[in-house]
Image: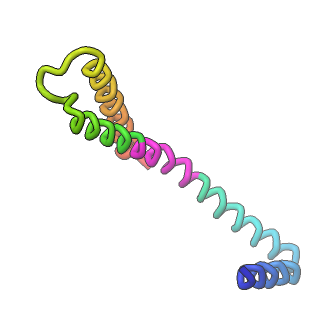
Amino acid sequence: MQRDLNSMQSDAKRLDDLPPEDLEGELRRRLERLEERVILLRRNLPTSLSVARLRRAVTELARLETMGELREGANGEGAKSLVMRLGRAVDELEILLREVQAPV
């Protein structure tokens, strides 16, 4: 922590010593880097959220299989619930594939 503070203090001193034109250029570069990171996060976040939702769906399917609800001839509310979950998982896969295949 102390090393981080020392680094920030030396960076602040360096910025204080810069001429106004150089300071403006440095701040512009830093802002551009931050904007690039925000764009990257916006691009990657939906994909990572979709993957997390798919993992939950797969976990749920494994649980249902362990409980025997995926056996042949299963019916009733359990089967309806399974069909709904599978449909959502397929939807998530389609969205994920579109995002991955989308031109950058």
Foreground pick, 28 / 16: 16
The N terminus lies in which quarter of the figure?
bottom right
Q: Total label count?
A: 0
Q: Quadrant of residue 55?
A: top left
* Residue at the image point whose x is 44% and y is 46% from the top: 47
* Residue at the image point whose x is 34% and y is 37% from the top: 57
Foreground pick, 59 / 29: 59
Above-or-below relation of 70 to 21: above
* Residue at the image point whose x is 48% and y is 43% from the top: 46
Q: Does residue 38 appear to the left or right of 14 in the view shown?
A: left
Above-or-below relation of 64 to 35: above
* Residue at the image point whose x is 31% and y is 26% from the top: 87
Range drawn in magenta: 39-52
Above-or-below relation of 101 to 40: above
Q: Main secondary structure of the magenta part?
A: helix
Q: Does residue 87 appear to the left or right of 20 in the view shown?
A: left
Q: Does residue 45 appear to the left or right of 54 in the view shown?
A: right
Q: Position of residue 31 (x, y in %)?
A: 71, 62
Q: Position of residue 86 (x, y in %)?
A: 29, 29
**Residue 58 belongs to the span the image colors magenta:** no
Q: Position of residue 39 (x, y in %)?
A: 58, 52
**Residue 51 belongs to the span the image colors magenta:** yes
Q: Position of residue 18 (x, y in %)?
A: 84, 81
